[in-house]
Amino acid sequence: MLMRLLNVSNFSVAKKWVHKNLFSSWASALITIFCFYIILKIIPAGLDWLLFSADFVYNFRGEQIIDRTFCSKVIEPGQHGACWAIIIVRWNQFMYGFYPVEEIWRVNIVFALTPFALLPLFFDKVIFKKQLIYFTFIFPFIAYYLLYGGPGLTEISTSKWGGLLVTLFLGVTGIIIAFPFSILLALGRRSKMPVIKSVSVIFIECIRGVPLITILFFGNIMLPLFLPDGVNVDNLLRGLVAMTFFAAAYMAEAIRGGLQAIPNGQLEAARALGLSYWQSTIQIVLPQALRISIPAIVNSAIGVLKDTSLVLIVGLFDLLGIGRAALADMNWMKLSHEVYAFVAIIFFILCFSMSRYSLYLEKKLKTDNSI
Amino acid sequence: MSSNQVIVLEKVNKWYDDFHVLKDIDLSVTKGEKIVICGPSGSGKSTMIRCINRLEAHQKGKIFVNGTKLTNDLKNIDIIRKDVGMVFQQFNLFPHLSVLDNISLAPIWVKKTAKKEAEELAMAYLEKVKIPEQALKFPGQLSGGQQQRVAIARSLAMNPQIMLFDEPTSALDPEMIKEVLDVMIQLAEEGMTMLVVTHEMGFAKTVADQMIFMDEGKIVEQASPKDFFTNPKSDRTKLFLSQILNH
C-alpha cells in the first residue's frame, strides 16, 4: 500500500486513489478512519516507549543503570519508557548464555562465518560459489571445534551455552539436518517397499501425533534409560535430536504434498528413458516437487525455529530461557515487558527474513522458467 | 524364435485387480517392422505397448525384447529400456529443464556421455525434428506439436532400436498433427522398428506393415493395411472402421 502511495506522484491521481481505496463507501470510510485513529494512537505511544522515553545506558538523571532500582520508571512513577539496560547489561547472556566471557570471541567468529556457509545453500549466483561450497561442508567441523573446543582451545561444556547461540544452533542445525532426512521420509512414505513405507509412516505419524514438548521430554528423560550405562548423551544434543526429528516429520509432509503434485507421466518418461529410480527422483521428481513445496517447507522451518523456545523446559537456556532467567534475577525482576519485547524482536527478525527468502525463492523460480 | 524377431509376446495376460485388461496376447515384431495398433478406448492397446518396456508388469505369459526376457529382474528391465524408446500422449517433457537439457539428460546420466557431446547430440536430433531454434526454451513455451517433436528427439537421443508411440497425436490441435506425423514418417523411412497406437488412419496406410485391431483386451484382427482397410474379416473391425473413417 505504501509502495503504491509512493508511486503516485500526481496529486489528483493520489486523490483518486484515496477515494477509490479508502473512502469508496460509508462503511469503508468508517473503517479507514477507525484504522487511522488506532494507528495514530498506537504508533506514537509505542515509539515513545521503545525509543524516545526509554532508558539505555543512563537513566533520566544521567546515572549509569546497574540494576532495576536505577531505571527511570522505577525511580519516577511519571516515567514510562522501557528500561533497555536489562538487555544491555546482560547482553552477553542474551547472546551467548553462560559461555565464559574470555572465550566469547570463538562464538563471534562462528556467528560471523555462518552467513558465508549458508550463502551457497540459499542463493544460486554467489561469487566464489565453488570455494564457498567446500567451506559449507567443512564449516560444521570448524564451528564444532570453535564452540566446543578441542586441541588448543579450552573445552566449553554445552551446559554453558545459551541465548541466541542455542536458539540458532538448534534452529539452523536442526532444520539443515532435518531437510535431507525429510526428503528421504517423504520418498519412503510413497515407496512401494512395505518395510520402508511402514517405517516412514510410523515415524512421521508418531512424531506428528505428539506435541514437541513430549518429544523433548522423551529425548531428555527416556532416552538415557534406553542407552547402556555410562553412555551419556549431552543435554543440548538430546534437544537437537528431538528438534531434528520434529522438523523432519513436518517437512516430510510438506515435501510429500509436492511429490503428489508431480504427474505420474514425469516418472514414467524418466524411467522409459532408462534412468534409474534414484536418477529419476533426483533429476526429475525432486526439483519439481521441492519447488512446489517451498512455501510449506519454509512455513515448517519458521515453526521449528519458534519452537526452539520450548527447550527451556528441559533445562536448556535458549533466547527465551535466558530472558526468563534474567527476570528471575532479583536485580532485574519485573522488567518482563522489555525482555519479552526484545526476544520477540529477535524472533521476528529471524522469521521475517525466512519468509522474505521464501518469497524471493518463489519469484525467482517462477521467472527462471515459465511452466 | 528367429533372431529377426525383436519383440515377442506369448500368451500375455494382465489384470488390474479384477479387470482382465490383456487376454492371451500373442505378437511378434521383426526388425524394421512398423505396426499400427488401433481399437476403442479401454481395449488394452496402450497397456500392451506399456508392457513392452515394463511401465506396466504383466502377470502371465512371456515377453521378449531383443531376446531378453522381461521379468522383475531390474537388470533386464534396464537393458530393455535402453533399446526401447517411448513417446507419450501427454509428451511428458520435464518442465523444469530446457529443451536441450530434456534431450541431453538421459545420454548424460544413463550412457555417461560427456555433457558437451550430449548437447551436440541433442542439437543434432533437434535439427532432425526441425526445431533447433527452440533449444534454449522451456517446454511450457512451446506449442503441443513442438513439444511432441522434442519428446521424439529426447527418445531418439538414446539411440533406441525400437520406438513405442502411445497415441502421440491425440492431445494435439488438428493443425499440429501433421508436423508430428511427418517426423514419424521420416523415422519409419529410416528403418526404425515402430509400434504405434494411433487412430490416424492416413498415417497407418502410409507407414504400417501390419495393422492390429484390439478390443476388450484381445487382438481381434491382424492384417496388412491393404486387407485391413479393404477387407476386414471381423464384424467388430468393420464397425470400428466405419465409425472412425466416416465420422
Image (spheres, coloured by chain):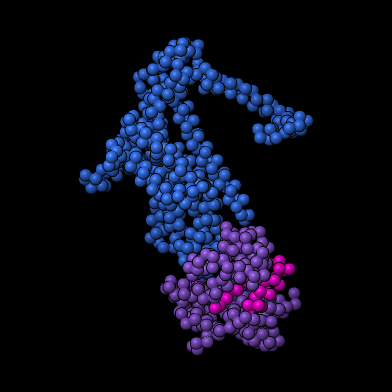
Chain colours: A blue, B purple
Q: Position of residue A15 (x, y in %)?
A: 76, 30
Position of the N terminus of chain A, as image quadrant, is top right
Depth check: give the residue in front, A215 or B237: A215
Up-down relation of residue B131 to residue A167 (above or below): below
Q: Position of residue A265 (x, y in %)?
A: 56, 64
For the point 42% across and 37% down, the residue is A111
User: In this rendering, would B162 be left or right of B240?
Assistant: left
Q: Is residue B173 above or below residue A154?
A: below
Q: Residue at x 40, y 61 (%)?
A: A194
Say if the magenta span includes residue B29.
no
Magenta stretch bounds: B161-188
As drawn, B203 above or below A53: below
Question: Which residue appears at 60% of the width and 73% of the height?
Answer: B165
Q: Residue furthest left?
A: A229
| Res A52 → quadrant | top right
In x, y percent, where is residue A343? 45, 30
Whole-percent x and y of residue A310? 40, 36
Question: Compared with residue B23, is residue A70 higher up or lower down, i.e. above or below?
Answer: above
